[in-house]
């Protein structure tokens, strides 16, 4: 029998977050909360940062909230700015990178859920995303 899902509300800047390699992953909905159906994250990304090319069984969908990103999917390169949506089917080689000069933000939907556990395990907890050292480093760099 499926577990009843609870309604979840997260106030701005209150999601659990971890830092991984110049990115902050804000967990909006985890597979544990969605009966494994999906995970939803907001990812804050420093300039010139992104994961290496990889593939996995999960399908990913990205929505660019802010900034300029380049998505590499198999042999295609897609440049996306604010408002761009990219759906990546499972098992395709892909990667992405913030190619802008400022911090960028993506929303990422993963289905089925579960892959967010990797980031939770690999990351370092972020208690104050607005004043995290990664963000302060870019603010300092941009102001010099």
Image (spheres, helix red, strand yellow):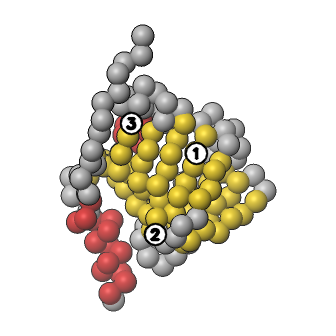
Alpha-carbon neighbours of circle 1 within 10 Å: few (<14), some, or many (≥20)? many
Secondary structure of the residue carrying tag 2 is: strand
> In the drawing, what numbered circle is on residue 76?
none
Q: Nearer the viewer, residue 141 or 84?
A: 84
Reading the image, the residue beneath label 2 is 66
Secondary structure of the residue carrying tag 1 is: strand
- Quarter of the image with the N terminus is top left
Q: Residue 22, can we see it?
A: no
- Quarter of the image with the C terminus is bottom left
Q: Residue at x 28, y 72 (%)?
A: 136
Reading the image, the residue beneath label 3 is 30
Reading the image, the residue beneath label 1 is 60
Q: Measured from the top left, where is residue 119 in percent x and y?
A: 41, 42
The earlier-in-sequence mark between 3 and 2 is 3
Quarter of image, res 21: bottom left
**Distance between mark 1 and mark 3 Cα atoms:** 14 Å
Q: Is residue 45 left or right of residue 84?
A: left
């Amino acid at each position: 029998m499926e577990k009843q899902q609870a309604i979840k509300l997260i106030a701005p800047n209150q999601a659990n977050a971890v830092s991984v390699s110049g990115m902050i992953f804000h967990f909006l909905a985890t597979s544990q909360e969605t009966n494994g159906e999906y995970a939803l994250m907001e990812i804050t990304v420093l300039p010139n940062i992104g994961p290496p090319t990889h593939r996995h069984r999960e399908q990913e969908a990205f929505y660019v909230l802010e900034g300029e990103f380049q998505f590499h999917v198999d042999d295609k390169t897609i440049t996306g700015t604010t408002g761009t949506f990219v759906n990546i089917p499972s098992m395709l080689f892909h990667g992405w990178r913030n190619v802008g000069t400022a911090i960028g933000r993506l929303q990422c939907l993963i289905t089925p859920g579960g892959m967010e556990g990797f980031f939770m395990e690999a990351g370092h907890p972020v208690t104050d995303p607005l004043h995290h050292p990664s963000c302060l480093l870019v603010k300092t760099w941009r102001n010099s």
